[in-house]
Amino acid sequence: MADNADPFRLRVAKALCDTLKSITAANGYQHDFSDYTDEISVQRARVFRGRTIFGENDPLPMLSVLEDPRSREPIDAAAMSGNAMNEYRLLIQGFVQNDQDNPLDPAYRASADVITALVKAKQVKDFKILGLGNVAPCVIGLAIGEPVHRPPDDDVSAVAYFLVPVTLTLAENLETPFA
């Protein structure tokens, strides 16, 4: 077994966040989701894992990678143990500055940057999607779903936001999560 401090799925989530942090103007995008240094010289992130609550002191634009809570298809009992191909369904939620006249325009632009970065991450020549190798455990597929864009509201967000569903196909052994 490989000597890894994090379970494979956390390593995948971190690799996905690293891909999202590569979205910068220097890399040809319209947005900057890289880490930054704030006004008091503290290193801060714009990409988060598993975070659902944000406040007015958080940076815009920013992203949060969440597991998709929607129900999943029943899994074949044989796939629940041992080596299998499993779906790891995530949602990338992005928050952007408001545009008073056209609130969704910034969300469309930011989600397009996110999708472009994801497409680049899956078009690697050596089949190392997200840089995680090509021998199990590894990511063998990355499918991008249809993005959803929403204006500010009082329930979810005070700023415009978007959701991009992502399904990663993992070759893994669920019985050895640290492999």
Image (spheres, grey):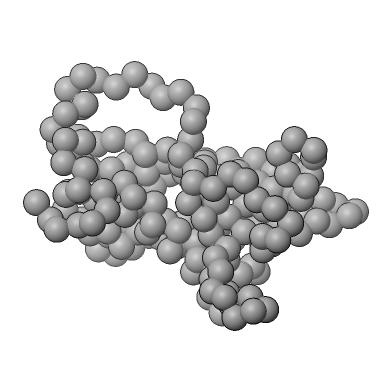
User: Eyeballing the image, is 26 above or below 1?
Assistant: below
| Residue at position x 80%, y 56% in the image | 98
Q: Pinpoint residue 120: horizontal percent, then vertical percent.
A: 44, 62
| Residue at position x 58%, y 63% in the image | 46
Q: Pinpoint residue 56: horizontal percent, then vertical percent.
A: 74, 56
138 or 65: nearer the eye?
A: 65
53 or 60: nearer the eye?
A: 53
* Residue at the limit of the structure toward the right, as seen here: 101
User: Eyeballing the image, is 90 above or below 63?
Assistant: above
Total labels: the figure holds: 0
78 or 179: nearer the eye?
A: 179
* Residue at the limit of the structure toward the left, as seen here: 1
Q: Pinpoint residue 64: horizontal percent, then vertical percent.
A: 55, 51
Residue 25, picture quadrant: bottom right
| Residue at position x 16%, y 35% in the image | 175
Q: Pinpoint residue 10: horizontal percent, then vertical percent.
A: 34, 50
20 or 179: nearer the eye?
A: 179
Is 71 positioned to the left or the right of 156 in the image?
left
Is 139 positioned to the left or the right of 82 in the image?
right
Is 142 positioned to the left or the right of 114 in the image?
left
| Residue at position x 89%, y 55% in the image | 100
* Any part of residue 106 in sight: no
Residue 114, picture quadrant: bottom right
* Any part of residue 134 in sight: yes
